[in-house]
Image (tube, grey):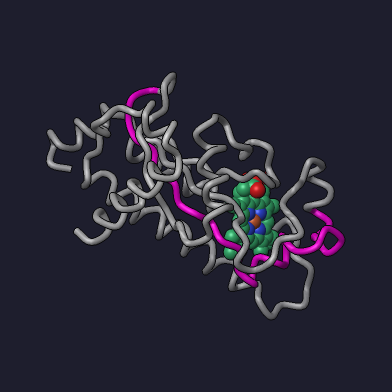
């Protein structure tokens, strides 16, 4: 399938960029292509959901309030958690310049991948086997890019809605420009889930 082929190429590309990480990784990545394709598809849907929600605010002259906020990135966070639960995965949003501190990079692999995305704007997504010390499986990472419609809440520091200034004292998620790397989705797929999906036919 075309999507999986593209992902494999990105995987190879990544290994080329980070030879030390490649040597540390097992030779055969434990990947079930169907499960990986499903993760890719669900993250595309999740990203489109946020872009669609943010677009509903465009053209509005009113400052976003707590209620409007509930209609953009909060539902995305809830949907991410639900996708994780339904599939036996962990689905996170990760950002170096985060708004919610829960979304700070949680391990070395997340830091490496987000750094890679920031240095190589052409890389949209990639998968990697779990690093040593993490439960066996693969992680799929997908870039989150800034859109013009995100500026209402992630634009200049001063222009942030007041609810953001009040509720997120540690906020770093401002001063972005459209096209900037805003963060990434990180889907951890444990090996056991992949095996089960194969056994039950997905
Ligand atoms: C109405 C205001 C609003 C708009 C518009 C908005 N965001 Fe957010 N965004 C927030 C808030 C508030 C949070 C923190 C949510 C939480 O506590 O989990 C957030 C969190 C995030 C996160 C999770 C990482 C972090 O920093 O905590 C990402 C990624 C993100 N936004 C991307 C976007 C993108 C991309 C767009 C445009 C398509 C967008 N946002 C539009 C308010 C907004």
Q: In the depicted view, which residue is nearer to us: 123 or 79?
A: 123
Residue 115 seen anywhere in this rendered image of the structure:
yes
User: Is residue 173 magenta-colored?
Assistant: no
Where is ligand 1, by quadrant? bottom right
Q: In the depicted view, which residue is nearer to us: 88 or 188?
A: 188
Spot occupied by residue 107 in the image (x, y as percentages of width and height):
55, 29
Spot occupied by residue 62 in the image (x, y as percentages of width and height):
78, 73
Residue 41 left/right relative to 54:
left
Q: Which residues are magenta?
A: 135-163
Q: Residue furthest right?
A: 158
The quadrant of the rendering that contains the N terminus is bottom left
Residue 71 seen anywhere in this rendered image of the structure:
no
Up-down relation of residue 133 to residue 46 (above or below): above
User: Is residue 158 magenta-colored?
Assistant: yes
Q: Quadrant of residue 24?
A: top left
Q: Quadrant of residue 198?
A: top left
Q: Residue at x 46, y 64 (%)?
A: 48
Residue 202 left/right relative to 38:
left
Spot occupied by residue 26 in the image (x, y as percentages of width and height):
30, 27
Q: Residue at x 45, y 39 (%)?
A: 18
The quadrant of the rendering that contains the C terminus is top left
Q: Residue at x 53, y 53 (%)?
A: 76
Up-down relation of residue 131 to residue 4 (above or below): above
Residue 201 left/right relative to 153:
left
């Amino acid at each position: 399938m075309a999507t999986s082929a593209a992902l494999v190429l990105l995987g190879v590309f990544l290994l080329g960029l980070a030879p030390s990480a490649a040597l540390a990784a097992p030779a055969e990545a434990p990947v079930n292509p169907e499960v990986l394709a499903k993760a890719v598809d669900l993250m595309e849907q999740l990203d489109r959901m946020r872009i669609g929600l943010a677009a509903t605010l465009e053209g509005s002259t009113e400052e976003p309030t707590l209620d409007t906020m509930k209609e953009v990135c909060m539902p995305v966070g809830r949907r991410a958690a639900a996708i994780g639960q339904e599939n036996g995965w962990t689905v996170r949003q990760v950002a170096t310049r985060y708004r919610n501190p829960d979304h700070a990079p949680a391990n070395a692999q997340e830091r490496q991948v987000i750094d890679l995305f920031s240095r190589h704007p052409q890389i949209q997504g990639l998968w990697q086997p779990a690093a040593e010390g993490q439960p066996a499986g693969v992680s799929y990472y997908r870039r989150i890019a800034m859109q013009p419609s995100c500026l209402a809440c992630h634009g200049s520091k001063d222009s942030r809605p007041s609810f953001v200034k009040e509720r997120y004292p540690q906020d770093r998620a401002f001063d972005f420009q459209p096209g900037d790397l805003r963060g990434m989705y990180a889907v951890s797929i444990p090996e056991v889930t992949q095996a089960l999906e194969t056994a039950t036919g997905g």
